Amino acid sequence: MAGPRNISVSEASRPVLPRHAKLKYDETRKVWVILAPERVLAPDEIAVEVLQLCDGKRSVGEVSDQLAAKYAAPREAILTDVIAMLQDLADKGFLTEIREKTP
């Protein structure tokens, strides 16, 4: 059941981890993890790289541009993969987005 906090990720979204979740490097296990109350998620290497770019300032499109340039890969393919990955995290409650403040 989708709650009101779930987001729909698009190219214009500016995703960020919610306040209750932190991306941290676990020295013991030598892996990156997302820590949230009573939950731990171990994203893969690519997901970690994408999440490190999700600062609430960059849009999904800008993140995709950066990764396409870094890996010399087709932007559309990267954009599709990034949106799918971020939407999956959003659906699990591990991602939110910065909304424009309206006066």
Image (tube, rainbow, N blue to C red):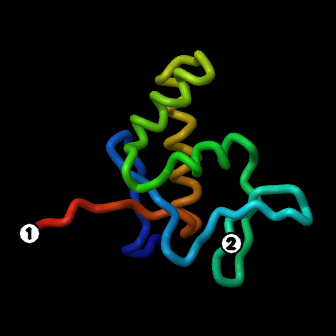
Alpha-carbon neighbours of circle 2 within 10 Å: few (<14), some, or many (≥20)?
some
Left or right relative to 73: residue 24:
right
Q: CA distance from mark 1 to mark 2?
A: 33 Å
Q: Is residue 100 above or below residue 84?
A: below
Residue 103, image x and y in percent?
Answer: 8, 69
- Tell me the SS state at disc 2: strand
Residue on which disc 2 sits: 35
Q: Earlier in the sequence, mark 1 or mark 2?
A: 2
Query: Which residue corresponds to the image point at 59% horizontal and 16% vertical from the top-left?
Result: 72
- Say if 13 sits above or below 71 in the image: below
**Residue placed under numbered mark 1 in the picture:** 103
Task: Give percent across and percent down for residue 96.
Answer: 44, 64
Disc assigned to residue 8: none
Horizontal and vertical percent position of residue 91: 53, 62
Q: Residues within 10 Å of mark 1 (few under 14, many from 20)?
A: few
Residue 14, position in %: x, y? 38, 51
Residue type at mark 1: give it. Answer: Pro
Which residue shows up at 53% across the image and 24% down it? Answer: 68
